[in-house]
Amino acid sequence: MSDRLDAQFAFLMEADKLKQVLRATTLADGSRPENSGEHSWHLALYALVLADQAGPGVSIDRVIRMLILHDLVEIDVGDVPIHSANGAAHGSDETRAAEAAAAERIFGLLPDDIGHDLRALWEEFEAAETPDAIFAKSLDRVQPVLHNLASGGGSWTDYNVTADQIEARVGQKVARGAPRLWDFVRTRLRAYFPDI
């Protein structure tokens, strides 16, 4: 019993490091960068509040679990912003390999039964093939958009983001899992991207 609790608490203490990973996106008020722990919590709340935007058969409980876990690998890899000069690294083979190694290490801290289940949820989110993961990925893409809208353009200004980049890197993912949500957000984006 003691070994199991040692492992569980080792994982939980490691997860605390996610609060130290700063993201390119700021808080909605623009006062400071958001950290990845805050982002994960906020996305879980998005799933709870926007559950009515999910497609048929989506389990919001599973979506929330994925969103709480999805960025833990950033403890090792850091945040790779999709619009930065290094945005090509987002989703690259090199980044995916680094994230897989981080997942192996971090989820490997847990007892096998828990670690296996949580790693499987993380992998499902990354693959974005199930209805739950597709919806979770949509929320992950839309939350930074709303922060940028609230903060006067935020990281879009910093990274000279174009309408085409928003459509390709964000819009397609959001529309795939939450089309009504993308329609709603897209109208608000026209203040910054008239061609969208």
Image (cartoon, grey):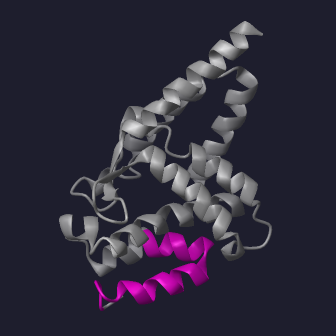
User: Is residue 64 among the parts visible in the rendering?
Assistant: yes
Magenta region: which residues? 170-194
> Is 178 covered by the magenta stretch?
yes
Q: Is residue 173 above or below residue 70?
A: below
Residue shown at the point (42%, 72%) measured from the top left: 146
Q: Residue 17: percent from the left, percent from the top?
A: 43, 31
Q: Residue 84: percent from the left, percent from the top?
A: 25, 58
Q: Viewer-proximal residue, 20 or 66?
A: 20
Residue shown at the point (52%, 24%) measured from the top left: 13
Q: Is residue 26 above or below residue 80?
A: below
Q: Is residue 130 left or right of residue 97?
A: right
> Is 113 covered by the magenta stretch?
no
Q: Is residue 180 above or below residue 128?
A: below
Residue shown at the point (80%, 67%) measured from the top left: 57
Q: Residue 72: percent from the left, percent from the top?
A: 50, 38
Q: Is residue 71 left or right of residue 29?
A: right
Quarter of the C terminus within the rendering: bottom left
Q: Is residue 71 left or right of residue 148?
A: right
Q: Residue 80: percent from the left, percent from the top?
A: 34, 49
Q: Viewer-proximal residue, 192 or 112?
A: 192
Quarter of the N terminus within the rendering: top right
Q: Viewer-proximal residue, 182 or 101?
A: 182
Residue shown at the point (66%, 53%) measured from the top left: 64
